[in-house]
Amino acid sequence: MAQRKYFVDWVRVLAFFSLIFFHCAMPFVTFGWEIKNKEQSIGLTRLIWWLHQWRLPLLFFVAGVGIHYSLVKRSVFAFAGERIVRLFIPLLFAMFFTIPFQVYFEWLQKGRITGSYFNFYPQVWRMIPYPEGALTWSHMWFVVYLFVFCIVLIPVFSLFKIRVLQTFKSFLADKLSGGLITPLLFLPLAFYYFTLFIKYPEQQSLLDDWFLFIFSITLMFYGYLLGGSEKFWNTCERYKYHYLITSVLCIIILFYNFWWSFNLPKQNDLMLYLYGTLNSIHIWLLILAALGFAKKYLNFSNRFLQFTNQAVYPFYILHQTIIVTLGFYIVQLPIPIFLKLLILLAVTFIAVFAIYRFIIKPFIITRILYGLKPREKNNSPSSE
């Protein structure tokens, strides 16, 4: 077993924590969401739009790295069983017992319902999908996609368990890990923009969501393919500034042409090709730069990492429900947006931490329902 890659754990933890800021900001931006403040911030909207471009692609890539290490120490059959326990069971529990609070407070703010949560809750069991009904996977779409990707790619994972193909996988990963070759892996991502972005706008609904589906599974497969190559990690570290500077230049051009006024391409023309090329380069090279800087400066462990690396999945499951529940009341306060955001961030972290520490972590049943192993123990490198 290779030495644990603590820097990948740090990237995973920091990326998931960024989601808490992302969703705490959503009541105050111009995009639709479960609950909304009366006033919105255009500056915060621009920041959130940029974060939206790369935060989930980064997590899908890191998930692919975790799959690589998970399959090093277990069979494909055991891996599939673990994915059911760690992904599918928490998903079902969240859909029926955690996420309904989000629908309740959304409908309450919009005046669609009145009365208590207990009067509302039976609507969940009518099995009518949101938005007509109350059953939804909401922010857990990431888990849905990740679970489906794992199942769909099981034949590929099985083939790469064969020794000769395993050797080929390592050979291919090293060949794709050169300083000039690795950045070119943005090309398939750009192709998806050219062919799928207009026809299949992002829905997070799994079905008829081909742009997001193919884009995300590609990044997860990149993580699985490249995660075991030391040459890849060294390349990220060596060229981190090159990747970061190139990504920043793309960001500047994208803001100037598209994001500042939210004027995205609406048809298959030259502007779509410009947007798809620049955004694909921006996303992919930003991922490489983040991994490179993390390898350089975050390849260590401490008590904070040990705690948060296990807590991050339950935090993810809980955070949006807590944000919507608390945000429903906070947006009604007669104070500026900035203060509302700070209060929402603070109380969300406190509430999620308390629920995790005193309700989820100590008990086997709640650990399983929130995606943790039944008993606490150290994991293999980046195997979550």
Image: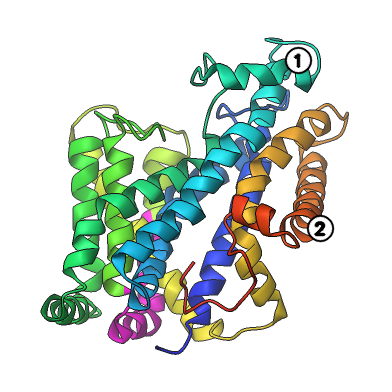
Q: Residue 382, relative to residue 212: is it above or below?
A: below
**Circle 2 crowding by C-alpha within 10 Å: few under 14, some 14–19, many from 20:** few
Tell me residue 108's x, y (percent): 73, 17
Q: Residue at x 35, y 86 (%)?
A: 234
Tell me residue 44's x, y (percent): 62, 42
Q: Residue 85, relative to residue 299: is it above or below?
A: above
Q: Residue 193, relative to residue 83: is it above or below?
A: above
Q: Which residues are magenta?
A: 227-250
Tell me residue 147's x, y (percent): 39, 49
Quick one: SS at disc 1? helix
Q: Residue at x 77, y 57 (%)?
A: 353
Q: In the figure, residue 100 lies in which quadrant?
A: top right
| In-front residue for pair 365/47 | 365
**What residue is disc 1 on?**
119
Quick one: SS at disc 2? helix
- Disc 1 residue type? Asn
Tell me residue 97's x, y (percent): 65, 35
Q: Is residue 252 visible?
A: yes
Question: Is 267 placed left or right of 317 in the picture?
Answer: left
**Circle 1 crowding by C-alpha within 10 Å: few under 14, some 14–19, many from 20:** few
Can you say which quadrant of the picture contains the N terminus? Answer: bottom left
Q: Which mark is residue 358?
A: 2
| In-front residue for pair 127/248 | 127
